[in-house]
Image: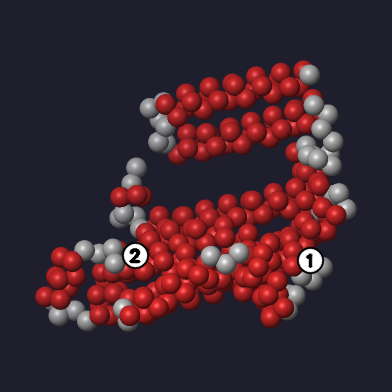
Amino acid sequence: MIEVVLALAIWIAACVINVMLANSKAHKTLLVRFLVPFIFGVTVLVCWELLVNGLEIPAVILPPPSAIAAKIASSTDLLFADFFQTFVKGALSGYIMGCGAAFLTAILIDRVPFLQLGLLPVGNVVAALPIVGIAPILVMWFGFDWQSKAAVVVVMVFFPMLVNTVQGLSASDHMQRDLMKTYAASYRDTLLKLRLPAAMPFVFNGLKISTTSALIGAIVAEFFGSPIVGMGFRISTEVGRLGLDMVWAEITVAAVAGSLFYGIVAVIERGVTFWHPSQRG
């Protein structure tokens, strides 16, 4: 019971500290922006550890962070193999192919307006398909290796990227387009010098949304068939063996990989769209 009281005290203290940091004059500095989520994350882990031990929660239901960390330390080779199979081969390859195809399709739709009436509704229908329904079909089509997982990722990321890019290509206003016409600019020049730069915030919005969708799609697709390696395969088999520490280890690796992937895209966005109001401050 002492652990429960201590966890509550730590939680309240961390909340007070974070509120003070958020309301301080230095709340926009890089240090404070790092400290607030860091304190929150450490507090969650410490309270998790204390509550699991204090309430005597069985490890089968919820293992403590210390057990998960120990499992990660003792299974680095296995976790890396699963990460490479799922993230690099399945999620990343599907992400590149799906987002690239969506970007090119959006330019084609912009160039040929009547395609917007035909392709976008079809894409909307495809995006509404449940992943648990299309994943086993694509596994049957492309086999049990990473190719089928990449195909699932392509389906998941294609439509969000397409919609955001199409919307972004229409972001420039009429006065800007009319000015390009007065310069006798071709469609190619207008696209490269005006419309694509103006569309970059929308394009990166689609890219950031797709980072999480790609990893989720690759992991879920492995539940329906995969070689004896991969995050989804490991999670499904370890759940059957009640190896919850390994399950949480895989979840931790997936969370870190997804966060870093999103962060890398966000950093690239900040460099490309430094002129946009959303990047100021």
Three-letter code for the amino acid on which mark 2 is drawn: Gly
Q: Quadrant of residue 93 in the image?
A: bottom right
Seen in the image, is 213 located left or right of residue 100? right
Q: Which residue is mark 2?
A: 168
Q: Quadrant of the N terminus?
A: top right
Q: Are marks 2 and 1 in contact (CB under 8 Å)?
A: no
Name the residue: 40% across, 55% down. Answer: 270
Seen in the image, is 175 located left or right of residue 12? left
List x then y, in percent, for residue 144.
Answer: 75, 75
* Viewer-side residue, 153 vs 93: 153
Q: Secondary structure at mark 2?
A: helix
Seen in the image, is 51 located left or right of residue 103? right
* Viewer-side residue, 241 vs 274: 241
Measured along the vertical axis of the image, is residue 99 above or below residue 11?
A: below
Name the residue: 68% across, 75% down. Answer: 137
Question: Foreground mark, 2 or 1?
Answer: 2
Q: Secondary structure at mark 1?
A: loop
Measured along the vertical axis of the image, is residue 50 above or below residue 86?
A: above
Q: Looking at this view, name the residue that lies furthest to the right.
A: 241
Residue 241 can be seen in this image: yes
* Viewer-side residue, 7 vs 276: 7
Mark sitting earlier along the chain (2/1): 2
Three-letter code for the amino acid on which mark 1 is drawn: Val
Name the residue: 88% across, 53% down. Answer: 241
Residue 146 can be seen in this image: no
Q: Residue 135's mark? A: none
Q: Colour scheme used in the picture? A: secondary structure
Q: Which residue is mark 1?
A: 229
Name the residue: 69% across, 81% down. Answer: 141
List x then y, in percent, for residue 196.
Answer: 32, 69
List x then y, in percent, for residue 20.
Answer: 47, 23
